[in-house]
Amino acid sequence: MSQDQTETRDRYRHFLGIQTRWSDNDIYGHVNNVTYYSYFDTVVNCFLITEGGLDIRDGRVIGVAVETMCRFKKPIAYPEAIEAGLRTAKLGNSSVRYEIGIFRKGEDEAAASGHFVHVFVDRTTNAPVPIPAPIRKALERIKTPGRMEQRERS
């Protein structure tokens, strides 16, 4: 996808409603850049917990963020209800690349979009491990077929 192309709602397989908070706004009256990463983290981990069975407190396997990126297209501000769209872009043995779009409620074009890469590791040793089967199954359900292959060809 070119840097100028705007992401649209129809490209995402899973959505989570998020209410912006007073503390999300910066001195300029819109959501601060770093807060978008919190929204990314929220949609990804909520999905892993509710759909993939990730046990964040006692599970042997955890996901560690190794890369994040966000492109800002339109400002959002408190008080707004937003929706975070999520899809799996690339699914490896121990890692996954998610793509996320942040949408104003009811809008088709993303206010921001980006990606987030997790490597799944053993909680004790911090060594990479295969993505647990229930999590992999959940991630496969939101995979957009052919997106990475199309991008690599262009």
Image: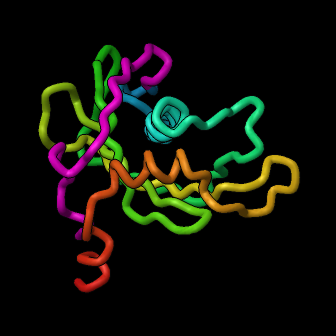
Say which quadrant the C terminus sits in.
bottom left
Q: Residue at x 72, y 55 (%)?
A: 121
Give the tally of numbered discs.
0
Can residue 16 be found in the magenta stretch? yes
Which residue lies most toward the right here? 125
Which residue lies most toward the bottom here? 153
Q: Residue at x 23, y 77 (%)?
A: 150
Relative to 83, say whether 22 is above or below: above
Describe the colour scheme in one phrase. Answer: rainbow
Q: Residue at x 68, y 33 (%)?
A: 56
Relative to 89, say whether 102 is above or below: above
Quarter of the image where one finds residue 1? bottom left
Q: Is residue 34 visible?
A: no
* Residue segment shown in magenta: 1-25
Q: 3 or 16, which lies in front?
A: 16
Q: Locate residue 92 relative to residue 16 in the image: left or right.
A: right
Q: Is residue 129 visible?
A: yes
- Locate residue 5, reporting x and y percent: 18, 61
Q: Residue at x 72, y 63 (%)?
A: 128
Q: 97 or 135, which lies in front?
A: 135
Q: 19 or 63, which lies in front?
A: 63
- Locate residue 130, reporting x and y percent: 65, 61
Relative to 100, say whether 54 is above or below: above
Q: Locate residue 61 relative to residue 110 in the image: left or right.
A: right
Can residue 58 be found in the magenta stretch? no
- Locate residue 67, reporting x and y percent: 56, 59
